Image (cartoon, rainbow, N blue to C red):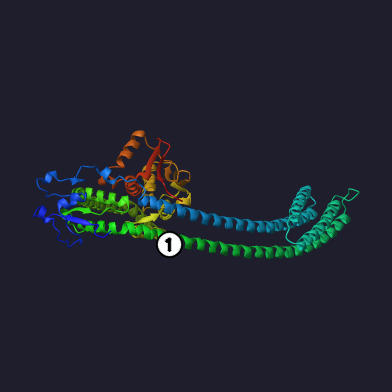
Amino acid sequence: MAGAGIYERNNSAGSEGYGKARSQDAGRIYENWDSCRERNIYRYCPNHKGKSRGQQKYRLWEHGYSMALLLKKDGKNTIRSRLAGYMQLILGMALLALLCFFFFHGVSIWQYQKNMDKVLVLNDFFSELDMNYRKLYLYVQDGEKEALDELGDSRKRLDERMNALEDVQISEGFVRDIQDLYFVLQHYKEQSFLIQEKMQGGKTGTFTPQLLGEAVTLYRKAGEIYQVMSAQYKDLHLTLIHEANIVQTSLNTRVVQCYMLMIIIALIFVTLSVRHASRLAEGIAEPIQTLTAGAKFVRTGDIDQFQSVVIAPSSYDEITTLVAVFNMTIHQLKDYIQVMEENARTTEALHIQEMENLRITSLLKASELKALQMQMNPHFLFNTLNMISRSVDMGDTDRTVLMLHKTAQLLRYSLDYSGRMATLAKEIEMLGNYVFLQEQRFGSRIFFDFDLDECFHQIQVPSFILQPLVENSVVHGLGGNTRKGIVEIRTRYLPEEKTGQISIADNGEGMTRETQKRVMAGLDSDQEQREKIGLANVNMRLKLLFGENYMLEIFSNPGEGTEIRITLKKIER
């Protein structure tokens, strides 16, 4: 197929420029328009006489045949037909290999499973024998009817296991051993029945100490027989294991044979594949190389200079189709490249803008979350320090040291976890320090009750979300309560819904529906209002972290107290 490729390039000298000058890019020759027409080849000629730029188009055969007629073939000399024959050969050989493999594999597994079943039958028999011996011991010890019933059931299962064991055929010696085992088992069962007779009072039906002694003696004889059968089990087990090893050796040999067969098939397959691939490559490689050389114009960016690729009649129909489509689409590629470049620039600019917006939004949220976490009620610190000062004045050293320790832990927690996340368990631990200080302040007027489901306490939450809620209950819920106040802190996990709940409830004055609506509206208030209301502070921090998977609810009635419930969805234990 030498000289199959012809690349035509624009020449300002007109049609005469299409002489026989050699192309330095592709190493092909240019041919004039008349020569191309005589050979019935097609090309794209933007500088043809009398044709403006807007009239540029592809020319097919001189007589106007369509592309479908140009490429219409009988379908017998196609790459597809060649590959179809090759694939049939591959599938046939692969099917043969698979059948051989599955046959050998199935036979091997069947023989191995059959041998293992023999071992399982032997193990089942002696497991049941061991169970029967224990049941016999329990019957001699207790003499209960329930133990006797269980012993009877065990005898039936033991007979079934013995019948199954007698069906195992390996060798004459093994069969004789099984027969010996059968006779020993019968002797063991006779002892078992005699024990049963003695335990039921013998012929008189009256159970006496003498009969018990005889039953114990018989039980010892049964134990000796049991030991004999246990010793037989070892020999029988070794026999079966030896047989299993023989079978395994045979299986390994068959596996090697199977692998050898697979290797032979693979070698035949490789040989045929190389032969067929060589023939196929001979009819494809040179036309493809010609087409690739033409594509270099696109790769180097010289699309404006490229006109068409011309090849001699190909061995395969697909090559002709490929070249025709390549030539037909090359002019569209010019427009596409321009549009794609513009779209790429626009997309990149939009992407950069979106990333910048996301970065700014993330920084704003992080800044707001950190600022909210650092908010801490100064009145609580003032009251705590004032209480510690009074304790010092009263000379209560132990109480003072303990309060200072709890306060120091709270302050350390505030410093260490400022702007950071903490586990719910850690948050509840620090809440315990806060509750202790409040109990020291209010004494018996307020009682704090913890009811915790700790299975989901390892989730990460913003620090200091529980203390403001409990402080709300103390200050606003129980502020005007004259009776004993109760604050309940509860956590619950709902595994079906993968939802965790945190609840802070008090038995204070409660609130009306109007007040509830006003409080809920204040949760989304501006920054100045959130600084004054602990509940809004907590709401904003949790909303920034959990988004749509977070919900805060208020349940309250006048005179019945208030409950603040936080629900966190889609969390794992």
Coordinates of residue 565 in the picture (x, y in percent): 41, 43
Q: For the point 86% across and 58% down, which residue is it?
A: 213
Q: Residue furthest toward the front?
A: 38
Q: Residue furthest toward the right?
A: 204
Coordinates of residue 250 in the picture (x, y in percent): 63, 64
Coordinates of residue 562 in the picture (x, y in percent): 40, 40
Q: Is residue 394 among the parts visible in the rendering?
A: no
Between 237 and 290, the residue placed more toward the observer is 290
> Which residue position holds label 1?
397
The image quadrant where one finds the N terminus is: bottom left
Drawn side of residue 135 relative to residue 106, left or right: right
Drawn side of residue 561 relative to residue 116, left or right: left
Does 291 appear above or below 477? below
The image quadrant of residue 436 is bottom left
Q: Residue furthest toward the top?
A: 513
Drawn side of residue 251 relative to residue 511, left or right: right
Between 187 and 245, the residue placed more toward the observer is 245
Q: Amino acid at mark 1?
A: Thr
Coordinates of residue 177 in the picture (x, y in percent): 78, 62
Question: Element under label 1?
Answer: helix
- Count all numbered tags in the image, as a single digit: 1
Drawn side of residue 297 relative to residue 485, left or right: left
Q: Is residue 507 among the parts visible in the rendering?
A: yes
Mark 1, Cα crowd under 10 Å, few <14 / some 14-19 / many 20+, is few
Q: For the point 30% across and 41% down, which residue is it?
A: 522
